[in-house]
Image (tube, rainbow, N blue to C red):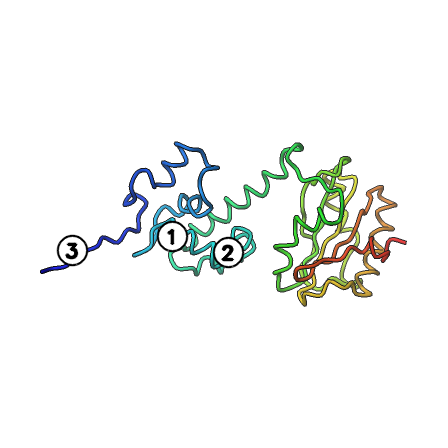
Amino acid sequence: MTEPTTQLIYRISDLHATERPRERLVALGPQALSNAELLAILLRVGVQGENAVQMGQRLLNKFKGLSGIHRTPIEELIQEHGLGAAKAAQIKAAIELGRRLTLESPKERPTINSPGDAAALVEYEMSALEQEHLRVLLLDTRNHVMDIVEVYRGSVNSSQVRVGEIFKAAVRRGSTALIIVHNHPSGDPTPSPDDVTVTRAIVQAGKLLDVEVIDHLVIGQGKWVSLKEQGLGFG
């Protein structure tokens, strides 16, 4: 007796109507969909033997969630089975739009009340970076985060960091305060002598420009250090 042929479902249209992400989004709203289903809407079609939802879940598993996909270089995503340049670009664009949305409305912007609040915004992503990145959190008068701007990529030391670059975005955006954040790829967040020297110079420049430097955080693997709490560079 001949075995029945099992159809390999790898297109959204092959799924039952009640299981299709797009139809579920229209009927129930985007908040009802899982991350894998939302990715499936962008992917539209999977690969042989793997539908778009399964493919979305595979990407989430491999890159450890949306944050992992966000920080993965697009060149690496393009190489992933079933993606290619167009789909990788769509996913990157969608995640970036979501990130910008959280900073767009003053009522929805994160508020910084402690070093831990600032660390929570960047720690997950920056702890996994393979080289040093220096970013600036721009704050308004109520300590709402206006934007997070990357200023340097590479070694953060007193001979390379130009203090003017730290304040360029703050002055342009009318930010009244900022927090500096950079990571140590070694995983050890202990501030180096250069970190302290750079901090001292930035704090002094902030006083001249009337932009308060609230803190400088060093992000390590699973932990972080506040230079202000340590009394380093803020004397």
Residue 147 percent across, percent down from the top left: 67, 43
* Label 1 to label 3: alpha-carbon separation: 24 Å
Disc with the residue nearer the chain's start (1 vs 3): 3
Tag 2 near tag 3, CB within 8 Å: no
Residue 54, numbered circle: 1
Mark 2–mark 3 Cα distance, whole angstroms, equals 41 Å
Q: Secondary structure at mark 3?
A: loop
State the quadrant of the C terminus.
bottom right
**Where residue 45 sits in the image (x, y, percent)?**
34, 48
- Judging from the image, what secondary structure is the residue with disc 2 in? helix
Disc number lying in front (1 or 2): 1
Q: Residues within 10 Å of mark 1 (few under 14, many from 20)?
A: some
Q: Earlier along the polypeptide chain: callout 2 or callout 3?
A: 3
Counting residues from the start of the chain, the first of labels 1 and 2 encountered is 1
Dot 1 lies on which element?
Answer: helix
Residue type highlighted by circle 1: Gln
**Residue found at x 42% / y 45%:** 37
* Left or right placement of residue 66 versus residue 8 in this view: right
Residue underneath mark 3: 4
Q: Position of residue 72 (x, y in %)?
A: 53, 57
Residue at 34%, 41% in the rendered image = 19
Disc 2 designates what residue?
74
Please report the residue visible at 77 percent of the width from the left and 35 percent of the height from the top.
141
Residue occupying the far bottom of the picture: 186
Amino acid type, mark 2: Ile
